[in-house]
Image: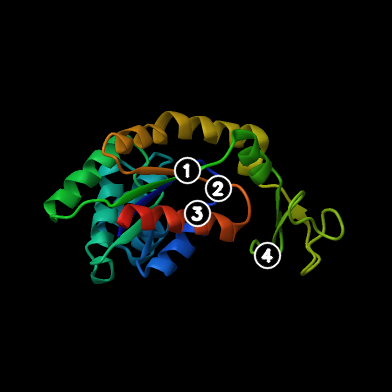
């Protein structure tokens, strides 16, 4: 299956993408991973992306599309893939359609993970990261440390990242509503969108997503 996963920041796209890709035996293609891989390997697209990023500018759509297309054409993606973080806007969605058409394939489904805005803010703004090891992550409501402000694992100081602050989260949501959310209507017009609730336990959300994909495949 060829799937696009969409949803606001804090919807759990990365977590769900990893589980779904494993269950479906297809690669999880994340925009963030693509950028890191191309930059670390010094590919022409990676070098071009880095030049924009170093200057503090947004990477143009055509560079992102080029990276995604290269990845989708690799052997492990021959039978499908799950796109996470791409496309981010309607022009990228249109370019993806053209690229797939050139390869005589098409998308099978677009999964829209739905989360109330206040829950998104609660999920992200409540995160606390360990200064000694950023892999140690806590949450003031869902996974609080035994001692406030102190990492249970190594005793490091827990802090809130600047991009996790409520005002920043609400700005990220506004960007999502303005730039990315319109792709849902774009794909809905093609009959590809299934909206599922991303509330509750991770495994429950995965089960809903798998059931939706099975209906699409039937």
Q: CA distance from mark 4 to mark 3?
A: 33 Å
Locate residue 56 relative to residue 77 in the image: left or right. Answer: right
Front label number (3 vs 2): 3
- Viewer-proximal residue, 11 or 192? 192
Name the residue carrying label 3: 208
Q: Earlier in the sequence, mark 4 or mark 3?
A: 4
- The answer to whether marks 2 and 4 mark residues whose Cβ atoms lie closer than 8 Å is no
Q: Which residue sits furthest right?
A: 147
Q: CA distance from mark 2 to mark 1?
A: 9 Å
Q: Earlier in the sequence, mark 2 or mark 1?
A: 1
Name above or below for residue 169 compared with residue 1. Answer: above
Under circle 3, the secondary element is: helix
- Viewer-proximal residue, 23 or 218? 218
Under circle 1, the secondary element is: loop
Q: CA distance from mark 2 to mark 4?
A: 28 Å
Q: CA distance from mark 1 to mark 4?
A: 28 Å
Q: Earlier in the sequence, mark 2 or mark 4?
A: 4
Q: Position of residue 157 (x, y in %)?
A: 78, 58
Under circle 4, the secondary element is: loop
């Amino acid at each position: 299956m060829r799937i696009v996963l969409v949803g606001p920041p804090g919807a759990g796209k990365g977590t769900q993408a990893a589980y779904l890709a494993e269950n479906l035996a297809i690669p999880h293609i994340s925009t963030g991973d693509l950028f890191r891989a191309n930059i670390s390997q010094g590919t022409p697209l990676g070098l071009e992306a880095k030049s924009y990023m170093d200057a503090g500018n947004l990477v143009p759509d055509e560079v992102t599309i080029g990276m995604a297309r290269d990845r989708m054409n690799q052997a492990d993606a021959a039978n499908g893939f799950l796109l996470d973080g791409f496309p981010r806007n309607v022009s990228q969605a249109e370019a993806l359609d053209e690229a797939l058409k050139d390869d005589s394939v098409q998308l099978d489904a677009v999964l829209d993970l739905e989360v109330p805005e206040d829950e998104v803010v609660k999920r992200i703004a409540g995160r606390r990261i360990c200064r000694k090891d950023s892999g140690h992550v806590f949450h003031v409501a869902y996974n609080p440390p035994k001692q406030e402000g102190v990492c249970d694992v190594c005793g490091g100081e827990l802090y809130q990242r600047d991009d996790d602050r409520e005002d920043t989260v609400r700005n990220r949501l506004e960007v999502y509503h303005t730039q990315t959310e319109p792709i849902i209507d774009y794909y809905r017009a093609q009959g590809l969108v299934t909206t599922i609730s991303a509330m509750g336990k991770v495994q429950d959300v995965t089960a809903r997503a798998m059931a939706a994909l099975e209906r699409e495949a039937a």
